[in-house]
Image (tube, rainbow, N blue to C red):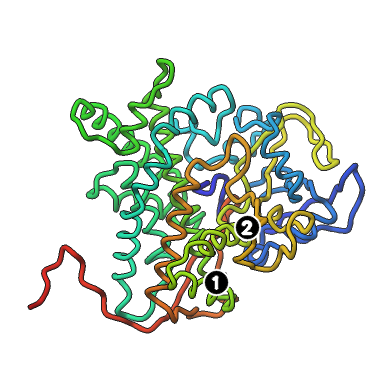
Amino acid sequence: MSTTPGAGPAPEPASCPVTGPAGASAPPAPELFTWEFASDPYPAYAWLREHAPVHRTTLPSGVEAWLVTRYGDARQALADQRLSKNPAHHDESPHAKGKTGIPGERKAELMTHLLNIDPPDHTRLRRLVSKAFTPRRVAEFTPRVQELTDRLIDSFVEKGSADLIHEFAFPLPIYAICDLLGVPEEDQDDFRDWAGMMIRHGGGPRGGVARSVKKMRGYLAELIHRKREGLRQEGADDLISGLIKASDHGEHLTENEAAAMAFILLFAGFETTVNLIGNGMYQLLRHPAQRELLQASVVAGETGLLETGIEELLRYDGPVEMATWRYATEPLTLGGQDIPAGDPVLVVLAAADRDPERFDGPDTLDLTRRDNQHLGYGHGIHYCLGAPLARLEGQTALATLLTRLPDLRLAAEPEELRWRGGLIMRGLRTLPVEFSPSARPPRSDEPSEL
């Protein structure tokens, strides 16, 4: 989930003396949160899994937190009710105050969303939101996702090169989630600008993320008000209208709750998908045998390998590096390590999903992998509500790229690419590619030449 909650500027090296299970000492840990680490964190995570599976470290923001890296411990932590999502349980120092969530969400009164609350409020809000975010709605959205995908490829197919992040992976989920939420088309470019600032992770002007969050909050409040007034008219079937109308046993979402939920659905609905498409295509280009296997299957009109392939890409180099913040509500033991009450806990999904105790050949990309209960979208009551939409967008995007641009190839060496500095999310800044240019097919709304 995103704007990469807790993300900050380009990280500095951070490490703490290693305390392994039951207080056992271990050699010094590898440096975490450097640029080298961001490019390939998996060797460091392998070291942590072996020597310090529950490891206390100082994050780039200065906050101290526990990193959970083994699959079994991660799955347990994701479902442990003693680990609260509510930041009120953080025993934070003055230096750490406000540094464990989305920048600006507190001041913008956007805290009452699913990433920051526990049962029973979480149960109530998720039930209400689920009524408006159904599998039927996602299935009905499939043609629109395909249309957006084709139009974006149309915009660069004739020139033979593109940056797949900025020209494709970024705008696709932004426009898709705006359509789903019911943001008018004339306002969607504003959302694209705000979202772009949110995923720059310190690369923009100081305070830019918080300002973008504030602007989005103001816009959502106005949009919700307009839609509430317009619900007297028939035909409002978008997600924000659904959030307004959703009720359960007489309970309704307040306007603040509706704004916060629309806000986090936008976050959850775009950066995870940007990274799923970007990371996924990057790994396919780096593994030509796997890419050719998937390409042949897609061209043949098959769907089975596409479905298992998306799950494997989520496991192998997924869009979410760490699950969002949790806080110990009481002293507890996890992976043999005692964790005091009030301490933050970050479950490292990227490490857990490469645990050799759970996955055979975890460092091998295998699109045919069947036993693949990865944690890429979480586990338990906080399992990602938008996962079906992200999967739809990921499958549609990759299948269409492989079909329409069959000789797609990297236009830069892997070591030249840069990864966005952050904490929760994992994604490329750019993905330059080349391919044989082809004519853009005419759209159905364009006049044909006679």
| Res. 60 visible in picture | no
Q: Would residue 297 be found to the left or right of residue 168 on screen? A: right
State which quarter of the image contains the C terminus: bottom left
Q: Residues within 10 Å of mark 2 (few under 14, many from 20)?
A: many
Q: CA distance from mark 2 to mark 1?
A: 14 Å
Residue at image mark 1: 284
Picture coordinates of residue 82, whole percent (x, y): 71, 29
Q: Would residue 192 be found to the left or right of residue 63 on screen? A: left
Tell which of 184 and 63 is nearer to you: 184
Tell which of 329 and 362 is nearer to you: 362
x 34%, y 49%: residue: 141
Query: Which is nearer the N-term, disc 2 or disc 1?
Result: 1
Residue at image mark 2: 315
Give the secondary structure at mark 1: helix
Tell me, yes or no, whether the two marked residues, 2 and 1, touch with CB atoms within 8 Å: no
Tell which of 174 and 131 is nearer to you: 131
Picture coordinates of residue 22, whole percent (x, y): 90, 42
| Above or below 236: residue 42 | below
Picture coordinates of residue 32, whole percent (x, y): 71, 58
Give the secondary structure at mark 2: helix
Q: Amino acid at mark 1?
A: Leu
Q: Would residue 186 be found to the left or right of residue 213 on screen? A: left
Q: Residue furthest left?
A: 450
| Above or below 355: residue 105 | above
| Above or below 258: residue 419 | below
